[in-house]
Amino acid sequence: MKCIIISTKKYKEKDALITAITEKEVITFHAKSVLDSKSKFTFLNVPLSKIDVTFIEGKYKYPLMKEASIVSSPLKNKSTLYQMSLLMLIQEAINGMLQEEEKYLVYPILSDILDNLDKNVSPQFISIYFLCHLLKISGYEFELNRCLFCGEKKDIVAFSFKDGGFVCRNCITDDIDQDLTVEQMKIILALFKSQNISDLSKYEFLNEDIMDLFNKLNVFIIDNYSIRLRSLDLLNN
């Protein structure tokens, strides 16, 4: 079974409970002696590693790992501080923003990100892209195709986080927040529409617009999820 590790928790003295996601589900399995430095399975202690695992047949409290092999590791010799911060953010966001039963839904996008960290796309841009898709999974599906009030597709002038999407000139009032600039509206539209890192690589936006959107998204997450993603602060430096 191929899966991506999202957390490791000590279980008994040197064992661990590994929680991972597959394309279809979230699984938690028991890995014996994985916390022993002499174990051949120490790679299971690295979150966001892609692995291939098999289990021993039988009735156990948790599926008991029989064998595992590493498919890929997020730890690379040339990883930058920003890339490492991105990996921390991904793990923190999955475990903080999604319900347990939702977590497997990030598998396709997470797998793509892990395979393409070395593409010419900034970690900050990738982080916003990932967070936008987490918002979608957890129920914040912003209206980005038309005005959220009247359905008009032309003359869009504003985006409101509070109201949930784009607003046209005819519907805008002083009571509606205008949270993003026109350029930032283009960025968030591109991010929500993109399905992979290759899609992101074709866009060119100013770094100051990306970082400003980055900070506004951070505030939205704090206000609506009541959590602070501390790794976002590392990416903001």
Image (tube, rainbow, N blue to C red):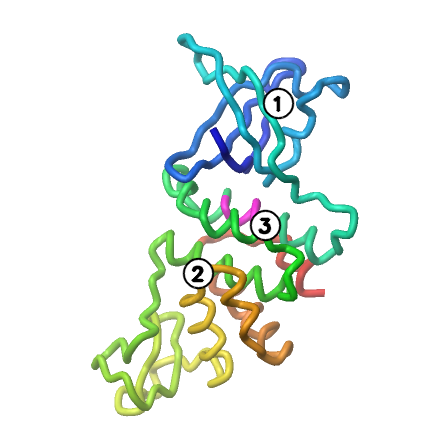
Residue nearest the viewer, comparing 199 with 102? 199
- Residue 180 lies left or right of residue 44; in this view the side is left
Residue nearest the viewer, comparing 195 with 158? 195
**Within 10 angstroms of label 3, few (less than 14), some, or many (20 or more) residues?**
some
Name which residue lies at 42% across and 82% down.
Answer: 178
Residue 72 rendering spot, x and y as whole percentages: 63, 39
- In the structure shown, which secondary structural element does the residue marked by tag 1 occupy? strand
Q: Find residue 171 and report its image quarter.
A: bottom left
Q: Is residue 67 visible?
A: yes
Residue 133 rendering spot, x and y as whole percentages: 43, 58
Tell me the number on the disc at residue 10: 1
Label 2, label 1: how far apart the Cα atoms are: 35 Å
- Residue 139 lies left or right of residue 213; in this view the side is left
Task: For marks 2 and 1, give the one nearer the viewer.
Answer: 2
Of mark 2 and mark 3, the one earlier in the sequence is: 3
What's the amino acid at mark 3?
Asp
Name which residue lies at 49% across and 75% down.
Answer: 187
Q: Find residue 81 and report its image quarter.
A: bottom right
Tell me if residue 69 comes above or below residue 114 in the rendering: above
Name which residue lies at 66% across and 23% down.
Answer: 41
Label 2, label 3: how far apart the Cα atoms are: 14 Å
**Within 10 angstroms of label 1, few (less than 14), some, or many (20 or more) residues?**
some
Tell me the number on the disc at residue 115: 3
Name the magenta segment's main secondary structure. helix
Tell me the number on the disc at residue 195: 2
> What range is drawn magenta here?
90-94
Tell me if residue 154 comes above or below residue 159 in the rendering: below
Quadrant of the rendering where the C terminus is positioned: bottom right
Label 1, label 3: how far apart the Cα atoms are: 28 Å
Residue nearest the viewer, comparing 180 with 58? 58
- Residue 225 lies left or right of residue 45; in this view the side is left
What's the amino acid at mark 1?
Lys
